[in-house]
Image (cartoon, rainbow, N blue to C red):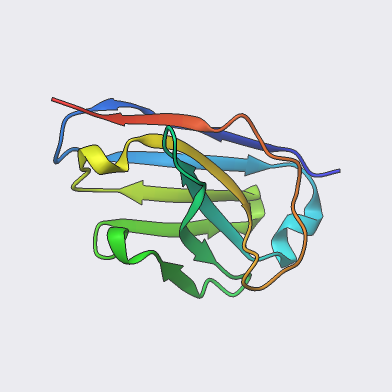
Amino acid sequence: QVQLVESGGGLVHPGGSLRLSCAASGSIFTVKAMAWYRQAPGKQRELVAGITSASRTRYADSVKGRFTISRDNAKTTVYLQMNSLEPEDTAVYYCNIDNAYESGWYPWGQGTQVTVSS
């Protein structure tokens, strides 16, 4: 059973940067397309960025040019570099399978809170 542990969130001023990490247990991770999602209070969870096993990436329009997703299969970790953060980026961030490429979900982790505020 794969377990996902997200980390790296925090409180940052508008225009600041954060780097999120998602550590996954289990070797099956390396063949899966993975993604970062976020959920703001009162809103549905939305995809932020996805990356295939071959490191092909896709992004939500709202984060294009500001966020970069990457993965290290040797470390079974997915990263999300977030630059030029805006208050609208405030949410709990989760990683999981990218359902544009794969079916099903891993058990959801606890997520990591990102708060962008002055």
**Which of the pair 81/47 is nearer the observer?**
47
At x 17%, y 30%, the residue is: 13
**Residue 55 located left or right of residue 40:** right
Quadrant in the rendering for residue 25: top right
On the image, the x and y values in percent for residue 9 come to 40, 30
Residue 110 vertical placement versus 84 (above, below)? above
**Which of the pair 64/5 is nearer the observer?**
64
On the image, the x and y values in percent for residue 97 come to 66, 57
**Residue 42 located left or right of residue 88:** right
At x 58%, y 47%, the residue is: 95
Please give the count of numbered marks on the rendered protein. 0
Residue 44 vertical placement versus 63 (above, below)? above
At x 54%, y 51%, the residue is: 78
Rendered-image quadrant of the C terminus = top left
At x 35%, y 49%, the residue is: 81
Residue pushed farthest right?
A: 1
Rendered-image quadrant of the N terminus = top right
On the image, the x and y values in percent for residue 40 come to 42, 37
**Residue 62 located left or right of residue 23:** left
Residue 58 vertical placement versus 13 (above, below)? below
